[in-house]
Amino acid sequence: MRIRELVEDDLDAVFRLRKLAFNSTERPERVVKPGSHGLVAEIDGRVAGVLGIGAYAQFYGGAAVPMGGIGGVAVDGALRGRGVANALLREALTTMREHGQAISALYPTVPTLYRKFGWERTGVFEWVELPMDRLLSVPRPSEPVPSRPAGESDLAALHDCYLEVARTVDGLADRRPPRIDLAKVLEMDLVSVLPGPNGLRGYLTATREAGGDMGRLKVFDLIGADVEAQLTLLASLASWAGTLEAVDLRITDPATVDLLAGTPLRHSVWTSTWMQRVVDLPAAVAARGWPRLANAAVDLEVVDEHAPWHAGLHRLVAEDGAVRVEPGGSGAVRLHARALGPWFSGAQNTHALRRAGLLEGDPADAVVLDQLAGSAGTPRLADFF
């Protein structure tokens, strides 16, 4: 088996594989997209499998950590059982490290496969249904913010407004170009912005969806930098009462749904879970934002057969407001590869990791890990790949 870089000449073979695996019907114009790269597995000169890696970054502690987003993993149905996916994932770890992607995320169709290589369930991607009567019950803003349709000149400010909120929600992607084409947002049916004195105070993007008697509005982003902006945007959705059955809102800022939107006790939520892996522990720790703690340290032993570059003994040191990983130490706390993602993201504490068999050692030694990565809320993504 040969693993190599994905090239444009692979388009037909890759489309055939992904059509079978994902029921894809639209043939793409190109297979290598800006801000992404991919791997192909060949057996006897035939494309046997493919894997894509997108260049993203996820916010943790307010800092954008370079992330490789794994997607489009497909194996020829006639060549399954020959270790094709295993070989692609093994090579992907090396490739992501070479590209400076210290962490990786993916949406798993086969969790057991990815767990074997160190990914573990970490966060959620969610949509919520907002009935129109509940939107009508949301308090109106005391000082409504004037809105207007967005134009091309607003794209940079719109992205800045998103980043202002996104950096406060662990797990959200920074939507960096070229992987994300910011201009694509203007193709949506509704893109409204709330101008402020220094950029935008908020914005809303949505498409009109068919279905039922009146249809629905599918809201991809409702971003408000302050409460009046959020309430203004929610009021704009309530203004559709009488012409819509409901609004489907992709959860970008959890405060919108949890603290403002008036969701009923029982409501519909569509959830996709994603898994994360730490590709390079020292690089990931150096890139992440951390709470400012008193100087502390914990000795780690990392067990990771697929990323040998960070396996072994390390010392995690918090000193003078910075956190680093240096070689050495006693290995007082043993972390398995699958534990690194949930710990790094704050999705699970050391007690849960211990009960899952992914962490060993004296709980007193592990307390620094919880103090560092303890997170308020579930890590979230609002982009699917």
Image (spheres, rainbow, N blue to C red):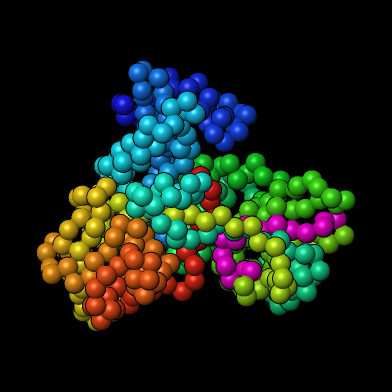
- Which residue is rendered at x = 58% and y = 41% of the image? 184
Q: Nearer the viewer, residue 6 or 219?
A: 6
Does residue 199 appear left or right of residue 370 in this picture?
Answer: right
Using the rendered view, name the quadrant where residue 302 is placed. bottom left
Residue that sits furthest to the front in the current view? 81
The picture places residue 116, in percent across and down from the top left corner, at 36, 50
Q: Nearer the viewer, residue 145 or 312?
A: 312
Closer to the camera, 361 or 132? 361
Q: Is residue 36 above or below residue 112?
A: above
**Which quarter shows the N terminus?**
top left
Which of the 4 image quarters holds residue 233?
bottom right
In the rendering, at what x and y percent does residue 347 appear?
A: 43, 67
Asked which quadrant contains residue 323, the reply is bottom left
- Classify 167 as above or below 226: above
| Vertical placement of residue 199 versus 22, above or below | below
Mark yes or no: residue 154 visible.
Answer: yes
Image location of residue 45, percent across then percent down: 36, 17
**Count of picture labels:** 0
Residue 244 falls within the magenta-colored stretch: yes
For the point 49% across and 67% down, the residue is: 378
Residue sitting at the far top: 45
Q: Magenta part of the protein: which range?
A: 243-257
Is residue 176 found left or right of 222 in the rendered image? left
Q: Position of residue 242 (x, y in %)?
A: 87, 60
In this rendering, would 92 be left or right of 233? left
Would you say residue 318 sits in the magenta stretch? no
Is residue 50 among what the camera can see?
no
Describe residue 312's horizontal placement relative to residue 109 as left or right: left
Residue at the (71%, 74%) spot, across then down: 265
Residue at figure coordinates x 67%, y 45% from the top left:
188
